[in-house]
Image (spheres, rainbow, N blue to C red):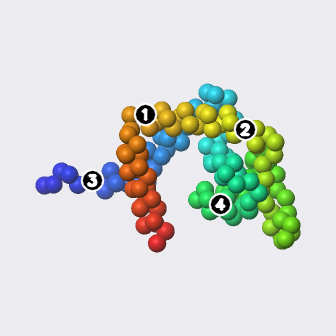
Amino acid sequence: MNTNLISLEDRYNLLAGRLFMYINRYIAQKFKSSSVTLTREQWTILVQLWKQDGVSQQVIADETGRDKPSTTRLLDNLERDGYLQRQPAADDRRLNLIFLTEKGKAAEEEVMRVANQALDQITAGLATEELETVKKVFEKIYTNINT
């Protein structure tokens, strides 16, 4: 018997999200203990807008890997909480573009400080090469899923 094979259960746990669930929970705990009122899901939306403000809902959905209904719900909540606003596109009034408000822009420094601290703690002890390997593996899995 070859004990080096990863069991189906271990593959599932590895690929389907046990680690990701723990990471999400850890980041959420760090946000809460630092008085960041955003969820991790809301944070990922804001990260996209901090990278490029004034994009369509579809761009945000694509960049965060979410479907349109869950993206709409997250945007609705962030708009209600004053982090962003929707504005009709100048060249196509049927298309809304998503823009950060001053509150959304101002939140970046503190939220990213907390997120980076959490990610530093999560990856403590990992060499740069190990992190690069993890990145490459995830990219291959992502490519396999999307081909």
Q: In this rendering, which labeled residue sits more in front, label 4 or label 1?
A: 1
| Element on which disc 3 rests | loop
What residue is shown with label 1?
124
**Residue furthest left in the image:** 1
Q: Is residue 18 above or below residue 54?
A: above
Q: Residue 139's quadrant in the figure?
A: bottom left
What residue is shown with label 4?
61
Residue at 61 percent of width and 43 percent of height: 40
Q: Amino acid at mark 1?
A: Ala
Q: Amino acid at mark 3?
A: Ile
Please report whichever mark, 4 or 1, sits nearer to the chain's N-terminal start: 4
Residue at 64 percent of width and 41 percent of height: 39
Residue at 61 percent of width and 27 percent of height: 33
Q: Residues within 10 Å of mark 2 (few under 14, many from 20)?
A: some
Tag 4 near tag 2, CB within 8 Å: no
Report x, y in % for residue 63: 61, 59
Q: Quadrant of the N terminus?
A: bottom left
What residue is shown with label 3?
6
Marks 3/1: CA–CA distance: 25 Å
Q: Nearer the viewer, residue 68 or 57?
A: 57
Q: In this rendering, which labeled residue sits more in front, label 4 or label 3?
A: 4
Marks 2/1: CA–CA distance: 26 Å
Residue at 63 percent of width and 31 percent of height: 32
Tell whether 79 sits left or right of 9.
right
| Element on which disc 4 rests | helix
